[in-house]
Amino acid sequence: MLNLFIDTSSKYLTLILEQDDKLIDHLHIIGERKHTEQTLPAINALLAKHHYKLKNVNNFYLTKGPGSYTGVRVGVTIAKTIKTINPLVKVYLITSLLYQAGRIDAVSLLDAKGGKFYFAVVSKGNEVIPSQVLDEPTILEIAKKYPEFPIIKDQLDEPQFDYLNNYFNLKNKFELIKDINEIKPLYLKKAVG
């Protein structure tokens, strides 16, 4: 099975092309505020480099957010459109906070702007406290209950983020979405503007 991972929830556009857990190729480029324009051409170029087309992809793995309002929509919209055209395609989703943490125990944070953070407590590939938006004092109070869990913040925006390792280690934690209407981004904040 040919699998394509897409993450557009941060300032990076991350693509991983693999077949049966064997890495074929990957891409991790700055795409901030350009995900809408860059993602589909980047996917097509990555696939074409290996003589594939979108129609050859059997499974899409995506981060569903939380994250950039526009960013989280891009990958999800691409996968939902392809599943509409080809109902045999499978779509798997995971939260960006869980993807950021990988398999470690952590308090996972992403900047939500305005003094708030997307927040989740994760342990061994599961959300112990689900994704939500909180202010820093509230997060620090909750984090006291998990003294052994490091706070990881905005790792998705770091060039050295180990996206390959986290994807492969969490692949079995992605949720298969069977109903096309359930393929949607995880918005925790209202859009500004």
Image (cartoon, helix red, strand yellow):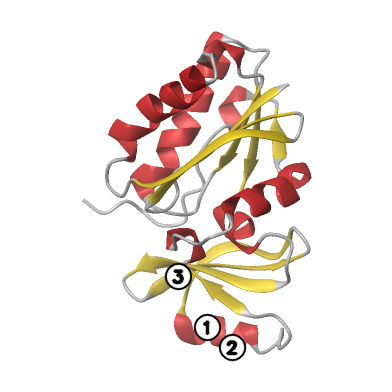
Residue furthest to the left in view is 193
Q: Is residue 91 left or right of residue 52?
A: right
* Mark with earlier residue (3, 1): 3
**Whole-Å distance between the Cαs marked 3 and 1?**
10 Å
In the rendered image, the vertical position of residue 189 relative to residue 140, given as above or below: above
Whether the residues at callouts 1 and 2 have beta carbons within 8 Å, the answer is yes
| Distance in Å between CA atoms under marks 1 and 2 | 5 Å
Q: Residues within 10 Å of mark 3 (few under 14, many from 20)?
A: many
The residue identified by callout 2 is 141
| Residue pictured at 47% horizontal, 17% vertical | 48
Which image quadrant for residue 129? bottom right
Pointer 3 or 2: first along the chain: 3
Amino acid on which the number 2 mark rests in the picture: Glu
Q: Nearer the viewer, residue 192 or 53?
A: 53
Q: Name the residue carrying label 3.
A: 117
Give the residue at mark 1. 138
**Residue 15 can be seen in this image:** no
Q: Position of residue 86 (x, y in %)?
A: 59, 10
